[in-house]
């Protein structure tokens, strides 16, 4: 039952959820009884296996490599225990693959692992993948709403069914392990992984945990447990990843132990009680100490107090962030309690070093045997020792199971139940379908955008609708509903129309992102009003009722957009079944309500962009829309005009990772000219010529007056750059972004092609720089057309830049006549199409 003000979780409050743990109150971390009983037969099999395995085989079992960096021959040589596929890793040249391609690769790895040449016993390999909202890296799979939407649905039975469907689709491609569910409890919505959390409320997440785990694995103690329909589940990321200071990904959770347990720990107690077989350690720290190396948490809490007996796996080179460690060497993490290193591209060096550390005694043989025992027990429970190769297992290669009609229907139901109605002035909704409907906004006919990150690639986005052969865009769903009732639906992204519509539906919101690439400094969606606000206001001024469908991975400050809309829906990231939105928007042809809104906010909605984090029950709780808010069609849905003061001022309204915008450098950066042997000259004023006559500069108009800079090299060598402030505190540490495939993105127009080389680079102090030849890329840009040039940061890192102390994130040098205009320079996600370095 859903309350109008507070979201209930099966009738349980947080206090009630805490009391469901055995002996609650007797200890801060009460022991949890796993339903996976100790099996003497399996234990004896493990004893026999350990007795026959070589030291090299044992070390191989605790190493997991990424499929992009591992061949079947290397599986055979190193006897690795597991392979993973990261968000951009798949067979072939694409970040995703067809079911046939995945299955062929699964067979190849499996057969290599089962080759007994040179060993007394073969150990089958496991393949893990981030199936976080369906089997999201396979062509044709069902993409369910991201967790933030499922949290708004408040339906544990629904998420159980989604998990079970996902397990079946994973089996089609030969995968037997998913890195899901994510059981984070986000407390600061600036965090780029907020949408991976179901709620800010630990009670809701705790109620979902057993539903998800039993959906993926089956119920422990029954014949369904880890049966041929099921996969190994992973609760992640242990612990506190949703509570880092400032909402910084891979940051520091600064809190006492009571808070750690009450907010972020209870979900793992419920996961263990549901029989979860794997837990993943968090990248983050707890009070300054990296979780990957914290034995008090990994062993003291997880093993000794909570009694977790499954396998503990690391995150993507997370061990390398532990003090004294590197990606290729980290006995500290292993001794702290990690059972399996996730070493995607560092596995060879890590294997050799770990082998040496066992031989030297830095890692004891008892600790190694303990970790291998846990891994082998999971493999035995999952039936991997008794199964044939992946292509011979149940559902393998069953293409009809991918995007199965039952799964799509389930996803469509999830979309309907996840929608939250925030505003419905004059009770505009539900709409009559037999009207002239204008559909606008860049999210209207864009399945990749409505699906968000972790969809066909790590960051998502950039994928055409044809790459979702069984999916439906939001516009397609609207068109089907309207035309079947005798109305008309017209798509115009810019909102222009020839025939006046009866109503306009505008679909817009965040572009896809994943992990730290989604971290924000504030919660304003568009503080400068440069995106859809003008479109909404234009329709509003014309007297056309406007329904806004907002796509986002978190609540954002959108007061101006709310004011310019007659009705406003938080649709989150609904996935491939866009028709679920039209199911709720429109009446039946006979005028009856087809589906009412049922979603309730599982995250509080901010009143301003700079408001301290708003969480139910927290201090100074004053959100715009409280936790549990959500209108029904019978509710009075009128919303008064809201303040359009975001709380931001000046450059604070611009994203931290934007360095040049609206025709000027963003503080503390300064656009300057540097000439060989001469002092820097600021390029100040609307137009002029540099003192030595090397460059002529001026302004231009792209979207608004003087929002671009135009630079012309007159023949002599000169460099322009964005210089930092006066001290080292202004310098950027871009190591995380370089390792995470982020890019320098420049919006530019070529006004005169370069007559010689043009070098783009970064500076990292007085005697530190790296440059890349971009001449060919510039010559490929059509003259006079705006273009986005994207250069991955790793290209500069490979060229020798110290990414920890960037003093100039943009530095461009030309030695001959050349002219270009630019309007925007920023740090951005690199799309799958922009991953190569210039010249590669």
Image (cartoon, rainbow, N blue to C red):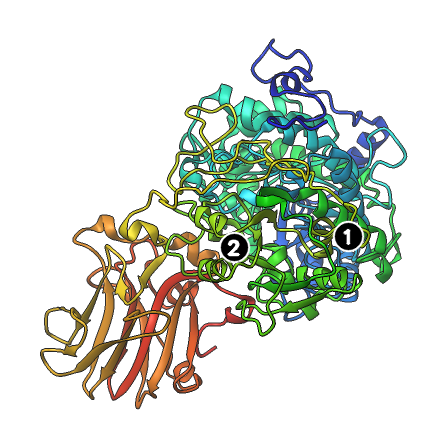
**Residue at the limit of the structure toward the top, as seen here:** 26
- Residue 609 occupies which quadrant of the picture? top left
Task: Identify the residue under disc 1.
Answer: 170
Q: In the picture provided, is 741 more to the left or to the right than 581? A: left
The answer for how far apart the CA atoms under marks 1 and 2 are is 28 Å
- Which residue is found at the position 80% from the left and 43% from the top? 164
- Residue 40 occupies which quadrant of the picture? top right
Q: Secondary structure at mark 2?
A: loop
Q: In the picture provided, is 729 more to the left or to the right than 533? A: left
Q: Secondary structure at mark 1?
A: helix
Of 810 and 112, which appears nearest the observer? 810
- Asked if labels 2 and 1 touch by Cβ distance under 8 angstroms, the answer is no
Whichever of callouts 1 and 2 sits on the residue coming sooner in the sequence is 1
Q: Position of residue 55 (x, y in %)?
A: 66, 44
Could you classify mark 2 by the number of other residues whose Cα lies within 10 Å: few (under 14), some (14-19), or many (20 or more)? many
Picture disc at residue 510 = 2
| Residue 161 seen in this snapshot | yes
| Residue 472 seen in this snapshot | no
Q: Position of residue 200 (x, y in %)?
A: 55, 33
Q: Position of residue 400 (x, y in %)?
A: 86, 60
Tell me if residue 753 comes above or below residue 586 in the rendering. Answer: below
Of 540 and 143, which appears nearest the observer? 540
């Amino acid at each position: 039952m859903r309350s109008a003000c507070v979201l209930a979780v099966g009738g349980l409050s947080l206090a009630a959820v805490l009391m469901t743990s055995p002996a609650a109150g007797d200890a801060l971390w009460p022991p949890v009884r796993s339903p996976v009983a100790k099996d003497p037969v399996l234990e004896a099999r493990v004893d026999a296996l350990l007795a026959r395995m070589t030291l090299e085989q044992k070390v191989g079992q605790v190493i997991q490599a990424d499929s992009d960096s591992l061949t079947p021959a290397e599986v055979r040589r190193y006897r690795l225990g597991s392979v993973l596929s990261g968000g951009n890793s798949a067979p072939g040249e694409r970040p995703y693959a067809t079911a046939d391609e995945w299955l062929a690769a699964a067979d190849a790895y499996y057969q290599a692992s089962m080759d007994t040449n040179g060993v007394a016993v073969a150990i089958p390999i496991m393949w893990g993948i981030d199936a976080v909202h369906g089997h999201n890296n396979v062509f044709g799979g069902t993409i369910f709403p991201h967790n933030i939407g499922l949290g708004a649905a408040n339906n544990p039975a629904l998420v159980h069914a989604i998990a079970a469907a996902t397990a079946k689709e994973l089996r089609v491609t030969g995968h037997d392990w998913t890195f899901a569910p994510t059981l984070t409890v986000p407390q600061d919505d600036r965090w780029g992984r907020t949408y991976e959390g179901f709620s800010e409320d630990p009670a809701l997440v705790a109620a979902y945990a057993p539903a998800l785990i039993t959906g993926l694995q089956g119920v422990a103690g029954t014949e369904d447990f880890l049966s041929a329909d099921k996969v190994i589940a992973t609760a992640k990321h242990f612990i506190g990843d949703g509570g880092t200071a400032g909402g910084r990904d891979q940051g520091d959770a600064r809190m006492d132990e009571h808070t750690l347990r009450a907010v972020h720990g209870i979900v793992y107690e419920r996961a263990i009680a549901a029989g979860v077989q794997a837990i993943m350690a968090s990248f983050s720290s707890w009070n300054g100490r990296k979780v990957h190396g914290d034995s008090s948490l990994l062993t003291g809490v997880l093993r000794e107090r909570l009694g977790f007996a499954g396998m503990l796996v690391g995150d993507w080179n997370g061990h390398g962030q532990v003090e004294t460690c590197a990606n290729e060497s980290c006995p500290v993490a292993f001794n702290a309690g990690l059972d399996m290193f996730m070493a995607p591209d560092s596995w060879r060096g890590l294997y050799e070093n770990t082998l040496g550390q066992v031989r030297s005694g830095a890692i004891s043989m008892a600790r190694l045997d303990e970790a291998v025992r846990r891994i082998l027990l999971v493999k035995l429970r999952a039936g991997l020792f008794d199964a044939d190769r992946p292509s011979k297992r149940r559902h393998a290669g069953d293409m009809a199971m991918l995007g199965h009609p039952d799964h799509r229907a389930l996803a469509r139901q999830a979309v309907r139940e996840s929608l939250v109605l925030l505003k419905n002035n004059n009770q505009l909704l539900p709409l009559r379908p037999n009207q002239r409907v204008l559909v606008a906004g860049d999210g209207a006919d864009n399945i990749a955008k409505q699906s968000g990150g972790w969809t066909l690639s790590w960051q998502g986005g950039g994928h055409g609708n044809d790459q979702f052969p069984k999916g439906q865009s939001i516009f397609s769903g609207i068109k089907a509903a309207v035309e079947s009732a005798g109305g008309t639906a017209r798509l115009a992204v810019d909102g222009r129309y020839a025939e006046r519509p009866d109503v306009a539906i505008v679909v817009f919101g965040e572009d896809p992102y994943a992990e730290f690439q989604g971290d924000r400094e504030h919660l304003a969606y568009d503080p400068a009003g440069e995106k859809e606000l003008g479109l909404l206001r234009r329709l509003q001024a014309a007297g056309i009722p406007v329904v806004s469908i907002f796509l986002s991975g978190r609540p954002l400050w959108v007061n101006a957009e709310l004011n310019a809309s007659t009705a406003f829906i938080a649709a989150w990231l609904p996935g491939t079944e866009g028709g679920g939105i039209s199911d709720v928007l429109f009446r039946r042809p006979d005028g009856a309500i087809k589906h009412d809104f049922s979603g309730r906010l599982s995250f509080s909605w901010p009143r301003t962009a700079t408001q301290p984090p708003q969480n139910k029950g927290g201090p100074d709780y004053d959100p715009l829309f409280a936790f549990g808010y959500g209108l029904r069609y019978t509710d009075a849905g009128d919303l008064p005009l809201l303040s359009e003061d975001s709380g931001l001022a000046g450059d604070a309204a611009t994203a931290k990772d934007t360095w040049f915008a609206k025709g000027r450098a963003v503080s503390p950066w300064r656009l300057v000219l540097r000439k060989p042997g001469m002092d820097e000259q600021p390029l100040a004023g609307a137009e002029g010529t540099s003192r030595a006559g090397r460059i002529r500069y001026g302004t231009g108009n792209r979207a608004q007056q003087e929002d671009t800079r135009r630079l012309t090299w007159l023949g002599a060598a000169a460099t322009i750059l964005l210089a930092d402030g006066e001290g080292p505190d202004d310098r950027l540490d871009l190591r995380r972004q370089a390792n995470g495939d982020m890019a320098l993105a420049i919006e530019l127009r070529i006004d005169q092609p370069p007559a010689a080389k043009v070098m783009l680079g970064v500076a990292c102090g007085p005697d530190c720089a790296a440059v890349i030849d971009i001449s060919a890329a510039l010559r490929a840009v059509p003259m006079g057309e705006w273009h986005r040039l994207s250069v991955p940061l790793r290209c500069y890192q490979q060229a020798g830049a110290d990414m920890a102390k960037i003093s100039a994130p943009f530095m461009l040098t030309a030695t001959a006549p050349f002219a270009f205009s630019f309007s925007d320079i920023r740090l951005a996600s690199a799309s799958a199409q922009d991953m190569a370095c210039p010249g590669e």
